[in-house]
Image (cartoon, coloured by chain):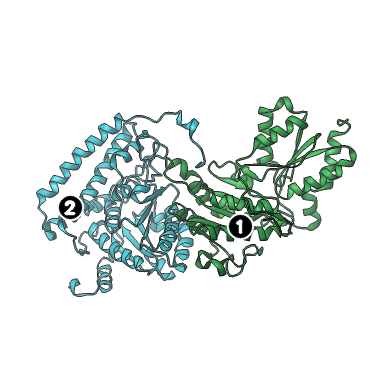
Chain colours: A cyan, B green
Amino acid sequence: MLESLTGSERVAAEVAQVQVPAQAGTKQRPKAGVLPKRAESLEIYRRMRLIRDFEELVQALFLKGEVHGTTHLYIGQEADAVGVASALGDEDRVAATYRGHGVSLAVGVDPQSLLDEMLGRATGVCGGRSGSMNIVDLSHRLIGCFGIVGGSIGAATGAALSLSRQGKGGVAVAFFGDGAVNQGYFGECLNFARVLSLPVLYVCENNRYGEFTPFESVTAGEIVERPKTLGIPSEQVDGMDVFAVRAAADEAVKRAREGAGPQFIEALTYRYVGHSRADPAKYRKPGELDEWKERDPLTVARGRMTEEGGVEASEVDEIDSEIEALVAQLRAEGLAAPMPDPAELESASEFKP
Amino acid sequence: MSQEMEFRQAIVTALDEELTRDETVVFFGEDVAVPRGVFKATPGLTEKHGDRVFDTPISELALSGAAFGSAVTGLRPVIEIMFGDFMPLAMDSLVNQSAKYWFISNEQASVPLVVRSAIGAGGRFGAIHSQTPIPWFLGVPGLKIACPSTPNDARGLLKSAIRDDNPVLFFEHKRLYSVKGEVDDDPVELGSAKVVREGTDLTIVAAMVGVRVALEAAEALAPDGIDAEVIDLRTLRPLDHATVAASIERTNRLLVVEEGPRTGGWSTTIAAELAEHSLHDIDDIWRLTTADAPVPFSPALEDAFLPAAEPLAAAVRDRLGTAIS
């Protein structure tokens, strides 16, 4: 049925389909979004599997004392970063949060250099200067991951100002969580972007908890409704289904590229681990985690690819094995990588010369 | 070619010249374009440079966030935060994003942005439109802070700030906007102080309006046989300690005049640096600042609150007594 509709009608129909109650345990959701070509579907799955296994490695290394400080893992939310990133081109720019490993890998940051950064090594993507929360990789369109809630919103809004002046159709994307919608950045920047009609896609990953607090207990109204009051098109998508996220992002990015101004997506998702290393997540409702895991983004993607996308289960298994081997290699190389030389602090300048 | 102009005209001239010279320069803020700026420091720019100069919502955090994001993606934004007192609203993007980026990105990119802001007391604006926000930023590595005292330095430093690859806070003292002076075409280097009056008995270090106060005091002291040298710091981060140290090597006495609270400002930094590195040159060193108190409103109170030439000269006479022979 969807095929007979125009682009915007199809988006509207798809959005209507995924307007599910924002509750865990909604096991049977209508499928949204048409699967891309086989090779692309497999690559999308591959990225999600990489993020999942990478994050599990980071967690394991953290527990061994090899990853220092704190970490904020992306496990459970893989479909959001990968779905949106799959809709982007070379001319686009991305800003993410301190829970940024997933977005980093989704936009193509080299996993070895990302892991090495977690490990504080000289070979890290930021030379061991930044750590887990503040990854920057301009060569892969990642203008930054920001350690303060809401920071990505300002950064992407500014990037959109540049992109709009360059006139090459570039779109800036801000990833942020449900907690960020109550920050000043959110209200100020969405209005700023709207009055200047900037090409920016705001992606709110509603993983249901702002740090340790359920979002609904500190958030008035519906997140998806807020942008609409500013005239910003706003959609809620199933954030556990990468193909639904991709379809929504594809349409939103297209609209922003064509000059329709800022766009907004709320992806309903869930993080499987605590907020950070210090959080055992005892605030979850009983059974909630298990219910969400039944709609695990990797399981959902595997199911749709084999049922609708003509992919063989063995092909997916192959990816799983390939990533397992890759991550083992990342671990070995990361732990063998050199630490930075403290002498660099002597020569480092606070300013660009 | 040198010409006389007001401080505010020097500002708009520098903006116009840099907007003309470099098409990646953009300028935006509250009431800066069509309304021409609340201090009338930015008239005519949007008429000449079109949508590269625009008015924004009253959203300081969006302003600074947009400046940061556009600066790391190819633009050289200049933003105006109308009063320095509004800077706390813009703090996250300036302090956590812009100032750190060069270092924590492992030098992938710097953040070429400029924040212009009107600061300082004497305008009867009360406690929350009269502050000198400089101490809030002094302890933030990665930021430069420019603070001109003359129209020539305003034009020259602003041009340098816009051309600089790092984030620069450019503070304009409200009581200087109507000051006139000769202005030439050259940029003025950031981080370089200037000896604006040579003397042998005492060095007075100041910035912005304080420089005018110090020069006036120096003239008042001359008939008493006290020959004061005056240094205009012009930039507070990085601070030109070498010029100050070289001066005190000759005069052996230092007075630092700072419009700002006694605790935590740049006068403290100068005193500490000299104590650490130039103790053998120092016979005396002291500071004249505003009190550790909010800026009062009433003209009677505000005038008494601020450093002024005559009390400053009296303080020098009192302090030095017969030391000068």
Say whether residue A302 is left or right of residue B113: left
Residue that lies at the very extreme toward the front in this rendered image: B1
Residue at 19%, 40% (x, y): give it.
A324
Nearest the viewer among B246 and B168 is B246
User: Is there a contact, CB below 8 Å, between mark 2 and mark 1?
Assistant: no
Quadrant position of residue B119: bottom right
**Location of residue B90 (image quadrant):** bottom right
Mark 2 or 1: the one toward you: 1
Quadrant of res B319: top right
In the displayed structure, B232 sits above or below B303; it is above
For label 1, the crowd category at 10 Å Cα-Cα, with few meaning under 14, some 14 to 19 and many 20 or more, is many
Residue designated by label 1: B14
Residue at 62%, 63% in the rendered image: B42
Tell me the amino acid under the disc marked 1. Answer: Ala
Quarter of the rendering occupied by the C terminus of chain B: top right
Q: Residues within 10 Å of mark 2 (few under 14, many from 20)?
A: many
The answer to whether residue A173 is left or right of residue A6 is right
Asked whether residue A54 is in view, the answer is yes
Q: What x and y, as percent, mark residue A307?
A: 12, 59
Q: From the image, which quarter does the N terminus of chain B lie in? A: bottom right
Q: Which residue is mark 2?
A: A42
Specify the subunit that label 2 lies on: A
